[in-house]
Every structure is written in structure tokens, then in C-alpha cells.
Image: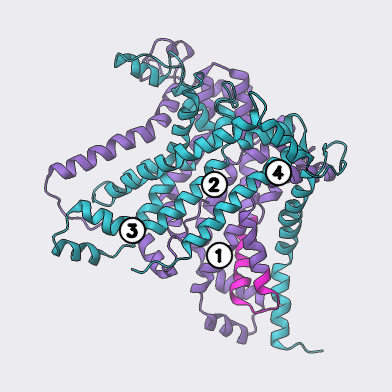
Amino acid sequence: MAISVDSSTEHRLEAAERLVGKPPQSRTRFSWETFLTYLLLSIGAVIMVTPFVWMILTSLKPATELVQFSFLPVNPTLDNYVEVLGTNSFGQWYFNSILIALISTTSVAFFDTLVGYTLNKFEFPGKTIIFLGILATLMIPTEMLIIPWYNMSVQLGWHQGTMQYWGIVFPGVITAVGIFLMRQFFDGVPNELLDAARIDGMNEFGIFWRIALPLVKPAVAALCIFNFIGNWNAYLWPLIIASSREFYTLPVGLSFFRGESTTQWEKIMTGASLATIPLLIVFILFQRQIIKGIALTGIKG
Amino acid sequence: MKLTLRRRQILWAYLFLSVSLVFFITIRWYPTLLAFNISFRDWNVFKGAGDWVGLANYADIWEDFFKPRSAVRAAFGNTLRYVLFGVPLQLALALSVALLLVRIRQLAGFFRAAYFVPFVTSAVAVAFVWNWLYAPQVGLINQGLKILGLPMQQFLRNPDLALPSITVVAVWRTIGFAIIIFLAGLQQIPDIYYEAAQIDGANRWHMFWRITLPLLNPVIVYLAVLQTIEFLRMFDLVQNMTQGGPLNRTTTVVLEVYNEGFSSYNMGYAAALTVILFGLILAITVFQLRVLSRRVEY
């Protein structure tokens, strides 16, 4: 999983820090080369961002404006939002998505760190085999597990009623990636500190919770952000397991909403905006952490 | 009885691991074995465990593969096309952007964010946004073509254009990830190499081919493998942009798994398809481990 095999954690940490850090501010003199660099980067950036701009602009247009083409809305309106939120289950889907992302993120933050800590700081028989047993699951694609999960869920009734929440969430309550990551980060916590707490008579869980965990907070934050985004966007499994409309997550709801609205693009773009805007806000707020986390771990989140 | 410190440590360790061990055994390992098991059975979810049919599901896939207008052959062929077009295109573009980004001082953070933003958004929402961009007549891209005096296109309904059109979206969506990994890789190359090369009179082009590219090799292999696996698992975009059409020209292996397993409830057959997919991913991962475990000396 490491970006390059022979770089130590500190080395990568330094490189990741440099990546998001402020560059030295020096006045660059004008040159055609710099101009061309900025020009190319700007063209690329326009291509990257235009779809989102177009999505939001379309959602602000009344249906009649879609036929005669104009880039900006002539009479901008929020009617589409009122209508989409009012006549659909978008509110419920929001609630579901938030609930599911929060449950899984809380659980991942607790269990992944606890297991990562144990695998780093404890010596016990079977340690290597347990670590490899967890690591090896990274090679199993979700697609291979959905059929068995579905069968298990049907047998246990997790595909009906309120149990659907659990049905959607259970495959992701602990992650191998997170454990692997946290195990690396606990390297930075000195053993002497833990031993000192032991001598003071603190129990092992207290040592983990009150001494070790606060020292890896930035890593836990990165893990939480990735996990939240991943769960918010998850599609294939929720699509399969959520059988009734009230239990859809936003992406699943959105794909059914699309089916019902066929060519009402202003409505579809409103739905897409509703599903996307919270993530854009999360991204703007945590941009540095997200990019640093990816540079540091090389993991897709 | 007083426990020794070491004994107590072992007990704590197992206590901390207990929930996770149960999880990995029941939610990861057992279902993995079950997937293999199901692939050898005539399995319908509502009837429970079906008859053991040996390799019949695999034989069916093999047979379907050679039928005229076979959806399975289309799925494997298209998936291969997504990988062969998408991965090199994405890596080449991402490396170019990363090389430009390391050269600038002002606005670097802004550009980085702009290139990265599609990565955090839902593939379903993105699929619809691009459906709208690609829309015939009124879509933004066709309006642009009209202004330029070029013929309008039916991007997603034209059997020859549909797959490339989806590939573009897939490349666009995850390119930010590749750019960040490339940037991190570029920053790990010590400046001394470039300074030394400059003293020796090497030009930019030489430095790129002799220093940057060789030292970036592990990063390139890592990304190629990761993105190949990602493209092999294409589903969200295709399902929401074309449902695999027109004429199966965009369908993928995972889309076939979904259709067979959850529309036709032909779960044995679908499980066999996932086992084949697993085999492909495993082969690529093993390849990665072998290539990457060669040490690179700076």
C-alpha cells in the first residue's frame, strides 16, 4: 500500500506536509513558460469544474429555459428545489445517508484504531496470523461478497423493515484498510509513555483511550473523512439490500428518481445537486486533510 | 490467582480484538468461501441452498461466451476496453498535470482542489450530470459543437461513441486521485539529482526521461494496478448512464453480475462471474507485489 517501498513514514509525512503547505512566496518574473503552464492548468481546471457549475446552473432554471439554450439562468429560481424536496423522499434519503455514514464512521473510528493499536503495541500468540488474515481480505473485491451477504441478510431478515439500516451498514463497520493505516500510525506513539501509564496503574483500555488515541488524532480524522465520503457515495450494496423506498440512501434514491423523471433535466440536476452539495462543502472544509491523507497513505479512502 | 503481567497483556489483546475477529470471520472470510460454494451450485436465494452442480455455471459462462450477441462476451470485452483506454489515458493526463503543478507557486492549492473535486462526489450524481452534458441537441457539449459548426453527436446512443464517452467520465472522475499520488511521488525525488544533471548540461527533456520517469516507476506501477482494478469493477457510471446499452456496447462484468444475480436471480451463475473477476484482480495484485517488492535505490 505504500507509495514507494523504501520511504519511511516520517519521510512520507514530510512530503505530504510539503504538498499541502504554503510554498515559499517569491515574486516570479513573467515568462512565456509560466504563462503557458498557467494557461494549460486553467483549461484543465475549467474542464474539471464545468460539469458541477452546469449542474447547479441547470437546477436554478425553470423548465422552459432548457429548450432555448442560454448558459446562465435568465430567471433564476429555487422552485425546482422546493418541488423536488416537497414531492419526493429526498428528506428521508438525506436522513438515511447521514445516519448510515455516521454509524459506520463511528464504528470504524473506534474498532479500526483499537485493532490497529493492539496489532502495533501488544505481543501475543497468533499476532502475525491475525494480521495477515485481516490484510488478506483487502484482496477480496466487494462484488464477490454481495451475493453471499445478500443470502445471509435474507436468512436473517436484514432486508426488511428497520433492519435494512443494519443490512446496509454491516459490511462496513470495520475496515481492513483503516486497521492497516492505524497500525502504522501507532508507530509514532512511544512505548515509554504507555509503560509510564501502566506503572501509574491505569488499565489497558484507559491507556488506549486517554494516552494513545489523542496522539494519533489527525490520522483518525483523515480515516473518518474518507470513511464518511465512501459511505455517503456507496451505491452497489445499498441498491441491492434496501428493498423499500424509505430506506434508500441518496445515491440509490437518486437513481430511482432519475428513472421517474426521464427527461426533466432541471429536476434531475436538482436531485444531483442535493446529493453533491454536502460533499462539496465537506471537501472545501477538509480539503487539506483529504489531500494530505491521500498523499500520505496512497489509499483511496 | 494472580496473573502475570504478560498473561494479562495477552488477555487484553484478545479482548480488544474479539469483536473484529468475529467480524472478519463472519463478514469477510465465511462469505468469501460461500461465494465459491454458491458458484458451484444452482442457487436461488428464495429457495436457499441449491443442488451442487460442479462446474456447470462456469461451463454455462464459457458456452454463453461464444453465442452470437453474447452479453457475457460483451461484458468482458468492454471491461477490457475500459481498462485499456481508461488507465493509460488517465495516467498520462495525471502525470502531465502533476508535472505542471509542481512548477507553479501561486494558486497551486486552488488548482489541486479543482482537479480533485470530482473524486469526492457520488458516481450516480456524476453519471446524471454527464448524461445531461452529453444530451442530444440541448446538451452543453452538442451546443458547443453547434457553435463551432461541427456536427452534433448522439454520444450515449451511438454504439461506437458510447463506450469512449463513458471512459472519459471515468477518467475525469478519478484523475484527481492519480494527480495527488503523482505529486507526492514527485516531491520525494531529491532535488540534488536535478541540480547535478543541470551542472552536467542536461536539458529538461533528458531530465524527465533519465531522472523523473525512472524514479517515479514504483508510483506508476502502483497507480496502474490500483486504477486497473478500479476500471475492472466499473458499475455505478454504466448502470446510471446507459444500463449497458446500446446493444450491450457499454455493459461490464459487474453489471452482468448485477443483472444475473439480482434481476434474474441466477445466483450461481452470477457468483461464478464474481469468482472469475476475483481471479483477475488477484493476478494483478500478485503482479503488483512482485514488481513493487523490487527495491528502488535513490
Residue shown at the point (60%, 62%) measured from the top left: A179
Q: Which residue is mark 2?
A: B229
The amino acid type, in three-letter code, at marker 3 is Pro
Residues beneath discs 2 and 1 located on the same chain: no
* Extent of the magenta region: A107-129
Residues beneath discs 1 and 3 located on the same chain: no
Q: Magenta segment: does it hold B70? A: no
Q: Spatial distance from mark 4 to mark 1, Cα to Cα? A: 27 Å
**Mark nearer the N terminus (2 vs 3):** 3
Chain coloured purple here: A
Residue shown at the point (46%, 29%) measured from the top left: B164
In screen coordinates, is A93 left or right of B202?
right
Query: Nearer the observer, disc 2 or disc 3?
Result: 3
Q: Which residue is mark 4?
A: A146
The amino acid type, in three-letter code, at marker 4 is Ile
Instruction: From the viewer's side, name the closer residue of B251 and A183.
Output: B251
Q: Which residue is mark 3?
A: B214
Q: Magenta segment: does it hold A128? A: yes
In screen coordinates, is A288 left or right of A279?
left
The amino acid type, in three-letter code, at marker 2 is Ile
